[in-house]
Amino acid sequence: MKLLTNSSGAYLTGDDIANAVLGYGAALANEQRVDLVDVPYIAEHGRVGSVRLIVGWHATMNAEVHQGQGVELLDGATLAELRKRVAALNPSGDTPLASDEISYLARVEEF
């Protein structure tokens, strides 16, 4: 299990879920975007709750391994949704400069 933490609190969830949330957040941050995700977590008395979290650009979130008792929280639907969202992200289109573009820029800087 992992403890997801952000400025609003801490939420105990499964390893795969926490990793998927962080991965989606990183993918969004690379695109300077944010999104809301519903994350299942272990609430009081072992009940499973759900929290809506902001992930992505400038949304600080951490996960730490939680050494505790209990069954690993699994949620295939959440994992599938997060993976789908990561796959749907379109890269910003930034591509490395070609050698002729680099040489042109070098000539411009000489002036």
Image: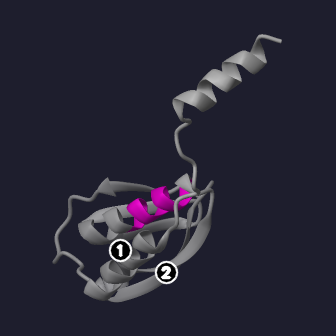
**Vertical order, 79 against 19 (above or below):** below
What mark, if any, has residue 83 been given in the picture?
Answer: 1
Verify CB contact (< 8 Å) between mark 1 and mark 2. Answer: no
| Residue 87 shown left or right of residue 9 in the figure | left
- Say which quarter of the image contains residue 69: bottom left
Q: Residue under label 2, please give it.
A: 51
Q: Position of residue 87 (x, y in %)?
A: 40, 71
Give the extent of the magenta segment. 21-29
Label 2 residue SS:
strand
For mark 1, does the 10 Å Cα neighbourhood hold few (<14), some (14 to 19), or many (20 or more) residues?
some
Q: How is the image coloured?
A: one colour
Amino acid at dot 2: Val
Q: Nearer the viewer, residue 62 or 31?
A: 31
| Residue 27 shown left or right of residue 19 in the figure | right
**Vertical order, 106 against 42 (above or below):** above
Query: Looking at the image, can residue 43 be seen?
Result: no
Magenta-highlighted stretch: main secondary structure? Answer: helix
Locate the C terminus and report the quarter of the image it occupies: top right
